[in-house]
Amino acid sequence: MKIVLLFLASLSLAQAHCEFPAQPVVLISSSQVLIQYWDLPSQDLLTESSLPKSDSFQSYQQKIRDQISVDTNFLLQRYLKLNPTPGDAHNILQTVGRPQNFKPIGCLEALLLEVQINRNPQMTTNPTEFLAAYLQKDGRLKVYFLTNDEEGLRGVGLDPLKTQIAKDLKLGWKYISNLHNHSFFLEGLSTNKPQGVLAPSEADMQLFKSHQEELGLQGASITNGFETVHISTSELSLYRAVRQITPRTLPQVYSPSTVSAHGLDQESRFNLDDDRLRASAVTASGTRTKFRAVFRRLVRDRVVSRGMHMFA
């Protein structure tokens, strides 16, 4: 009897196959953004541990392993030594202190990363990022996928995705988690580029916290193609997010006196205790140009430290 059970168990493992059961529904597809989703009849992919058998995913992993250690602690400590922003350093230390949040990459995470790998043949040298959102209802799983095929997640596409999720929430769906990828830059191994860092940046946390506050996000995940870290709702408050600066919080300010007059020296507007300041992404190119001009003036007038990185 034991032999039969062992045979059936091994047969089940052999038959386990990591793939989407259907093609995605494309909501937006343009030169700037792709938003699509899969509406799955079960949540099995969330717990499936087998990985895609595709050449593209396996080749991606092998290229990276050939160039750099993919040990999570090594990658985190490596980036800490490269003098990241104080906020990013804080987030790394918060993540390192919670080893139970790490696990090997699973099927669904690998499938979503594979979508991005297939979109970008230079994924190991000029990588691009995606954001996925997991929604749950009555045993079903809806997976949204957003990318703008850029190194970071910018404003384009983020608002339409939030709008779509908000519509689903009204229909009874729950926003149980999201997934974001952190990449390797194999042509930048001798630079201060982060390599597969499994910790949220300040910009990541700004996004995660806004989704938590506005959409009820229950957890956030980051994968580098080898391991994934999951941050629960209760832990999100422990991480530092970038200060968001919008037209409402940044009027036309060009000198120290007017900065003070508008109250922009308050921590609610600027975090001057940090070595660097980042601005939130602004979608309209004209507004971005105006903001850059404002920050250049602020730097020139010594309101903001010259060591700060603008619009990283």
Image (cartoon, rainbow, N blue to C red):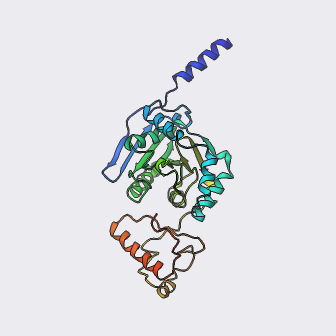
In the rendered view, would you say 88 is above or below 4? below
**In-front residue for pair 114/1:** 114
Residue 57 percent coordinates (x, y)? 46, 36
Q: How many labels does the image show?
A: 0
* Residue 154 found in image quarter: bottom left
Single out the residue that lies furthest toward the front.
190
Q: In this view, does 184 lie above or below 46?
A: below
* Residue 237 visible, this orientation: no
The residue nearer to you, when weighing 310 against 287, is: 310
As drawn, the residue found furthest toward the left would be 30
Q: Which residue is drawn at 61% across and 52% down?
A: 76
Quick check: 145 left or right of 216?
left
Taking depth in this image into account, of 7 and 61 the one nearest to the observer is 61
Q: Where is residue 220 in the image (x, y as percent from the top left)?
A: 55, 51
| Residue 107 in the image, given as x and y percentages of width and height | 52, 35
* Residue 25 showing in the rendered view: yes
Using the rendered view, name the quadrant where residue 47 is placed.
top right
Residue 260, image x and y in percent?
52, 85
Q: Quadrant of the N terminus?
A: top right
From the viewer's side, name the closer residue of 44 and 9. Answer: 9
Does residue 148 sit above or below 45 in this rendering?
Answer: below
Q: What residue appears at the point 43 percent right and 76 percent down from the top-left corner? A: 296
